[in-house]
């Protein structure tokens, strides 16, 4: 009996869910796993370890742990990746499952980038709950702009969009901004059905009180009110999206390599090819030629990164193609 | 024995402390009380009631509760004043202390305004932890701009200043902004002494991690790093303060009555006659003539408001003068 053929494992451990892909070096998927978020910062280390263990076990199934030659875990929040205690504790889960081959914990930014392109140099712009732009050189993060997180105001992020939605709705209810549809949607989302006789100024106060009574990150859920109001022609919503796109394009410009051929990867729920994604791409290409790609399956990006030390350039390019066209 | 001569009570129930002034209608102080914050939103209703009761009892001393004809409580956060359950519960404390005369709970904005001027119409600009501008007509709030609170980003507020301080420090540590002194002060304040050999990019990550590990409102404490760095000639700090002053002047412009004689009252720790107060006054007066006053003792403003229903115009003007020149 020869040694089993080598296998790689990619983990995309996001804030809200964890996805695992187990594949061989030809890109054949051998198993997939899903679980709740495995971000220790958001969920605590115990819950994060449990989420990771469950998703890994599901994905591994009958795969011989000894066949796993390389594992890459992409962890939400660059600050946690690398040498931190949390990433070491997460990596400890691998040993518990018999995965004794090489492993690496990287920021989820690298995983998103690798999910879109095998090229070693380029830039990545993420707008999800937060917003960040990174320059990638030799598949490592060489520079970061933004990524301050919700508390410090990541302009153009989902949190920022939701925050601006409430501010604009409050101003509209006070008769100080033209955003009728946006105000309606935000009030309905936050307060539910309201008596149409309530004066706008009073609704504005109720809105503020309700927003402060909820956890701050709930604001990010209001981002979709902005898109919906924009599609209905609301000028206040359009203004927010224009400013968001401007902020995001400027963030990217801070880190983009000079070579216009270097790919620009867009990732995160707010940069889906929707109202904000379109506006942002328009602004990016208005600054000059740009090859804009979209990040797909993060677990596939992580699995591909796990294969990097095992294959040569041509094999890696082929593997990338197979892994990232695979249906999720 | 005739009925005791009438007495008024003013309460300034702020977020961090509560101040009470008991005075007769000639403006003679009969007692003062201090206590912790009595803001139910920040401290919970039980703690707020206890703080209010303690400060009131201290101020009343031997004063006959039957002599108290009128009480005004200025409560931090306009949203709580008026008809809310919380303000009713706070007012309930008055009955427990035998204060059965008239009483009114008003937003602390009105109390700050009244502390600076007896004139019924004008405007008030506050920058403390949050920032808000209100138009006062007939001693009532007729319009509000800003006041969205820390979460929604009150530009020019203490929270905003602290937030910008961290963002600018992070950018400076990443080599993306010129704010050497500000970065130094923020790092020292948040991280304490650090090894001078640590690369800036790593310090930036440590700074972000530490900021997110602390309660959000702690950011407001970093506002003074901005003032201090500005005094040392730091360009990043100067930029933050210029933007803050611009935001605050614009906020005020949204609510200022057209009559240039109507007073403009500045209040809040960030608008003290310091680096930001000076810049803001310069921008306000650059827009045209303005009579800029500063709010002093909020409890005196509340006591004066309590006397409004009891005296005529001339008596009120005299009382205002006596109450607000009194040493605190």
Image: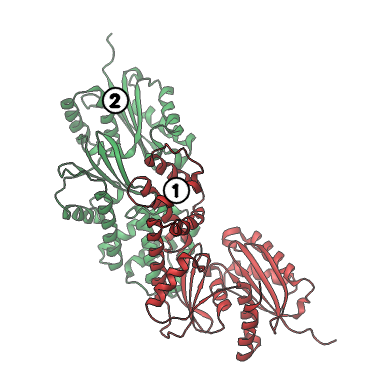
Chain colours: A red, B green
Judged from the image, the secondary structure of the residue bearing numbered disc 1 is helix
Q: Residues within 10 Å of mark 2 (few under 14, many from 20)?
A: many
Q: Are labels 2 and 1 on one chain? A: no
Classify A145 as above or below B162: below
Q: Position of residue B319 (x, y in %)?
A: 20, 28
Q: Quadrant of the N terminus of chain B?
A: top left
Subunit bearing disc 1: A
- Foreground mark, 2 or 1, reads 1
Q: Position of residue A249 (x, y in %)?
A: 40, 72
**In which quarter of the view is residue A240 placed?**
bottom left
Classify A264 as above or below B142: below
Subunit bearing disc 2: B
Q: Position of residue A285 (x, y in %)?
A: 41, 77
Q: Residues within 10 Å of mark 1 (few under 14, many from 20)?
A: some
Q: Residue at x 66, y 86 (%)?
A: A310
Judged from the image, the secondary structure of the residue bearing numbered disc 2 is strand
Classify B293 as above or below B91: below
Left or right relative to B144: residue A116: right
| Nearer to me, A245 or A98 | A245
Residue on which disc 2 sits: B8
Q: Residue furthest front?
A: A232
Q: Which mark is residue A184?
A: 1
| Nearer to me, B269 or B242 | B242
Q: How many marks?
A: 2
Left or right relative to A41: residue B1: left
| Nearer to me, A266 or B104 | A266
Q: Residue at x 44, y 45 (%)?
A: A207
Q: Residue at x 31, y 24 (%)?
A: B70
Left or right relative to B271: residue B100: right
Residue B150 can be seen, yes or no: no
**In which quarter of the view is residue B309 placed?**
top left
Q: Residue furthest top?
A: B1
């Amino acid at each position: 009996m020869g040694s089993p053929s080598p296998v790689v494992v990619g983990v995309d451990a996001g804030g809200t869910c964890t996805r695992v892909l187990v594949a061989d070096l030809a890109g054949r998927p051998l198993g997939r796993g899903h679980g709740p978020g495995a971000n220790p910062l958001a969920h605590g280390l115990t819950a994060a370890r449990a989420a990771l263990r469950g998703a890994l076990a599901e994905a591994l199934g009958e795969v011989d742990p000894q066949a796993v030659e390389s594992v890459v875990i992409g962890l939400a929040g660059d600050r946690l990746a690398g040498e931190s205690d949390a990433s070491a504790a997460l990596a400890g889960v691998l040993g518990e499952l018999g995965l004794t081959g090489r492993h690496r914990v990287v920021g989820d930014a690298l995983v998103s980038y690798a999910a879109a392109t095998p090229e070693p140099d380029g830039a990545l712009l993420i707008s999800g709950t937060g917003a960040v732009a990174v320059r990638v050189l030799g598949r490592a993060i060489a520079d970061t702009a933004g990524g301050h997180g919700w508390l410090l105001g990541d302009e153009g992020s989902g949190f920022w969009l939701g925050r601006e939605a409430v501010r604009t709705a409050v101003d509209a209810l006070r008769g100080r901004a033209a955003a009728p549809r946006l105000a309606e949607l935000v009030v309905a989302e936050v307060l539910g059905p309201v008596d149409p006789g309530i004066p706008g100024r009073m609704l504005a106060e109720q809105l503020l009180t309700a927003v402060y009574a909820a956890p701050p990150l709930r604001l990010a859920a209001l981002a979709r009110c902005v898109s919906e109001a924009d599609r209905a022609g609301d000028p206040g919503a359009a203004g927010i999206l224009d400013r968001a796109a401007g902020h995001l394009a400027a963030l990217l410009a801070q880190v983009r390599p000079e070579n216009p051929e270097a790919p620009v990867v867009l990732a995160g729920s707010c940069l889906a090819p929707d109202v904000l994604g379109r506006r942002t791409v328009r602004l990016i290409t208005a600054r000059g030629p740009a090859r804009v790609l979209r990040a797909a399956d993060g677990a596939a990006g992580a699995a591909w990164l796990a294969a990097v030390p095992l294959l040569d350039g041509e094999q890696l390019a082929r593997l990338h193609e197979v892994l990232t066209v695979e249906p999720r």
